[in-house]
Amino acid sequence: MRSSNPVFSRRGFSRDNGYAGFDAQQVQAGTATNPYATNPYAVDPQTGTAPARTGAMTIDDVVSRTAMTLGTVILTAVLAWTLLPVDAANLNKSYGIAVVSALIAFVLAMVQSFKRKPVPALILAYAAFEGVFLGVISAATSTYIGAGVVIQAVLGTMCVFGAVLFAYKMRWIRVNRRFYGFVMAAALGFVLLMVANSLFAIFGGGDGLGFRSGGLGIVFGIIGVVLGAAFLAMDFKQVEDGVTYGAPRQEAWLAAFGLTMTLVWIYLELLRLFQILSGDD
């Protein structure tokens, strides 16, 4: 099962060097009941064990790579918050740096998405620039909206992550072809609406179509968080299948990459949602 998130082109694990991986097209089309059947290192369904192999991805690999990637995001966010002031005299300059950083992060994410193998330096560079963007946006929110909004968004992101992980482990969430198709269709519609809203805001002024303010903003903020939670479930499925079917260790970087993008998505949606709710008080 392929996992995905807001960067829709991100691929799942590969089959390079004879290791099992994700063949998303076959799984989605229903032409392969077990795309990992030819993997000599896959878990035997009868015994529940797999032959030992050096270099296979483990949960510890995913945790350590994700910690490095998220740690880079947090470190650069803190540095940006500290070094890029958002007072009246410097706000435009700091915002400009944040926008440029976001664009660079997007380009790096897209480059990684189209590469056959994960490139750790590319993923960490994405995390660094994404952190700069988040640091400035969070500092501005704390300064002009309220410090509590940022704390709420951080705690909310942690709660969503924990809740989805618990629900996934309890098998309350089952990621299958139907789940994948529904989430991707909903995400595509959501992104198109947000793009249209932004274009109307840029060229027409005001709040655009109103999808990011008022009552509609709250509704779409909740939808964005729910979509992020669904992407998390697909990321967990990707990790689980990668470990079970013997993906090479380097693929742990792809899992870290996907989890980081998903958590950033959730944090930004919660930040926007709490901004709107704070403004309504």
Image (cartoon, grey):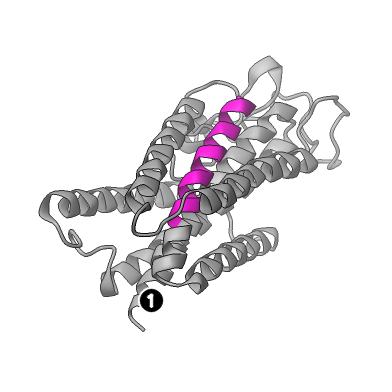
Report whether 123 appears left or right of 71: left
Nearer-the-camera pick, 238 or 63: 63
What span is colored magenta in the figure? 118-137
Q: In screen coordinates, is 101 left or right of 190?
A: right
**Image location of residue 264, percent across then percent down:** 51, 51
Which residue is disc 1 drawn over?
277
- The residue that appears at 39% across and 64% down in the rendered structure is 272
Left or right position of 224 against 243: left
The reply to whether the magenta stretch includes residue 147 is no
Can residue 1 be seen here?
A: no
* Three-letter residue code for mark 1: Leu
Residue that lies at the very extreme toward the top in this rendered image: 17
Of the 4 image quadrants, the one containing the C terminus is: bottom left
- Asked where in the image residue 173 lies, by quadrant, the reply is bottom right
Query: Which image quadrant: the N terminus?
Result: top right
At 83% across and 42% down in the image, what residue appears?
48
> Observer-nearest residue: 241 or 69?
69
Secondary element type, mark 1: helix
Q: Is residue 278 above or below residue 272?
A: below
Q: Is residue 253 visible?
A: yes
- Identified at 28% across, 75% down, the residue is 215
Q: Residue furthest front?
A: 89
Q: Residue furthest bottom?
A: 281
| Image coords of residue 158 (percent x, y) | 61, 63
Q: Is residue 74 left or right of residue 61?
A: left
Q: Is residue 134 located in the magenta-colored stretch of the structure?
A: yes
> Which is more toward the observer, 39 or 83?
83
